[in-house]
Amino acid sequence: MKINNTLKKLSAAVFFTFIIVLILHSCKKDNRGANTSTIGPPVISQAKAWYESTYPATLVAAANVKTRALNAASNGIFDYTQHIKPDWVRGASYTRYNTGVVELPIDPASQKISSDFKNMTNGNVLYNKKYSRSSFLLLYDGKGYQAYVMTIIADSAYVNNDMSKLALTTYKKRDPNFSGVVVYFTPTGKFISSYGYKNGTLLPPTPDASAANTTSVSHHTGGVATGRFHADEYAVNDCIDWYLDTYEDDVLISSEYLYTTCSPGTPTPGGGSPTSPTPCTTPTTTPPADAARFVPDVPIPTPTPGGDGDGGLPPPVPPAAPCPVTTTVADTTNNPCAQLAKLNAAIANAIIEQQNQALLIDLATSSLENGYDQNLKSWTSGTTGPYVPTPELTASSATPDQMNPPFNWDSTNGFTIGFSHDHPNGSGPSPADIFYMLLNSKNSKLTAAGQQAVNFYKTNASVTIVTSTNNYVVTINNWDAVQTIYNKYIANPAAFNANVVKTSQTSSYEAALLLAFNGAINLYTDGGLTNYYPLTINTTTNKVSEVQCPTM
């Protein structure tokens, strides 16, 4: 089996959505839209007091730039508070999206910074630092502030040697012909969101940094034999890792990974610009799961009749929908025992049983991995059946432990909620199996069906591994945590894989997986018997044992 860096490149284009929240108190609607009334100087002075107490800083001397540049590779996140500060004298205050805004340029006494928007996969710079400009945004909801650094990088063709164009686009009002990208960070350098424009039109964003339609070309770059454990087994699309390279006085001091994009699907109509909603909550500096990520080279959508929002730039975090009403559904996915009945019913299903029996036969005759999609005939009934037959998939002799399972979400091919495959060498589930589920939850075929479909998938998604001695099923009980783990993985896949392999060699592949995902997954095995049971780990001894579930 192999440890490869493939999964670093998995991701997909999915689509921009608004945050839905449950409001426990009454909410008054405000139909003023994008009010531009002046907040006044007192707001700026209050904002300054808040900012300087929240982000105390001693600006780093320029003489240390070369020293810092030597550590640029390891110091990916750029803490703006230690390099630049707002120019409170030239600040502008106004109201937008029913939120007070203080927009400030960088203080001239700060270090001179500039940023490239870079395709790290091939080393090409999409937007050059020469055409970049950063500023500060402080958003106020009447209760408190949130602060952001907004970096605008214009397209060179748009600038066309006229550097004055860089001043034409602000948060409040942008040039109607602007082409380029706007990237939002917290003052301490945490990436929040990004938006792209082409000829004044907002390009459809994708909500997640780590999502892909898992089809087509494999990108394996050589692996390390692990004996019993492999991290990457799914072939993926051509993908691009996007970075923001930050320079101080033209010296590179930070190269920060933003996200990955893969061959985007057809954008959802109207998936671009936010309008002027009436928020019931204030955006925070924590990006939601559907925070926008700019996807280069998507088709330019037809401009929205009446213009793009209020003519300014999109907020760092989209305003919430007005006074939403939501239904709370009990989440039992984090209880491994609660899923047992469903898992055991699935293996009793005639189609699933036939698939697993076929894989067991394949183990005796083939050294290549084989597998089947687990597709439902319908999902709207809210059940996990009936299933539809799917064709057997077989890995190639060139990549015997890698497959390219399709993902479907339609009435013709069925609705994919799982993938069952064998591991000829007897290894258990791999990190790739968990990441496969995560990335499919972002698949454009699924997200196009709406949030209810995504929720259904997350509740029912699983991966089954068949070996000659026993079978495994793995599910995700904390999707946000798995996303965080995946982000760490793609930041340094070699270190992630090395740690997992080391654990598997000194204990077991079950222990390695459970420790790597730190409670974010449920792992089951049938132990060669009829029914599944969940596994747990003692993190002190790294010993895996059966969870004693109540009798169903």
Image (cartoon, rainbow, N blue to C red):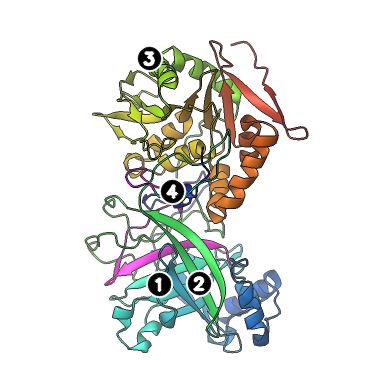
Residue linked to disc 3: 354
Q: Nearer the viewer, residue 373 or 502?
A: 502
Q: Amino acid at mark 2?
A: Asp
Mark 4 to mark 3 CA distance (whole Å): 32 Å
Secondary structure beneath label 4? loop
The part of the chain drawn in magenta is 189-218
Image disc number at residue 288: none
Q: Nearer the viewer, residue 308 or 361?
A: 361
Q: Quadrant of residue 445?
A: top left
Position of 70 relative to 393 (above/below): below
- Magenta stretch contains residue 206: yes
Residue linked to disc 2: 245
Secondary structure beneath label 2? strand
Circles 2 and 1 in contact, beta carbons < 8 Å: yes
Looking at the image, tell me whether mark 2 or mark 1 is earlier in sequence order.
Answer: 1
Mark 2 to mark 3 CA distance (whole Å): 52 Å
Circles 2 and 4 in contact, beta carbons < 8 Å: no
Q: Amino acid at mark 4?
A: His
Q: Amino acid at mark 1?
A: Val
Q: Residue at x 32, y 25 (%)?
A: 378
Image disc number at residue 125: 1
Looking at the image, tell me whether mark 1 or mark 4 is earlier in sequence order.
Answer: 1
**Residue 251 image offset from top left, x and y in percent:** 55, 81
- Magenta stretch contains residue 365: no
Number of numbered discs visible in the structure rendering: 4
Residue 191 seen in the current view: yes
Looking at the image, tell me whether mark 4 or mark 3 is earlier in sequence order.
Answer: 4
Q: Is residue 492 left or right of residue 234?
A: right
Position of 301 relative to 511 (above/below): below
Residue linked to disc 4: 220
Looking at the image, tell me whether mark 2 or mark 4 is earlier in sequence order.
Answer: 4
Which of the two marks, 4 or 3, is nearer to us in this view?
4
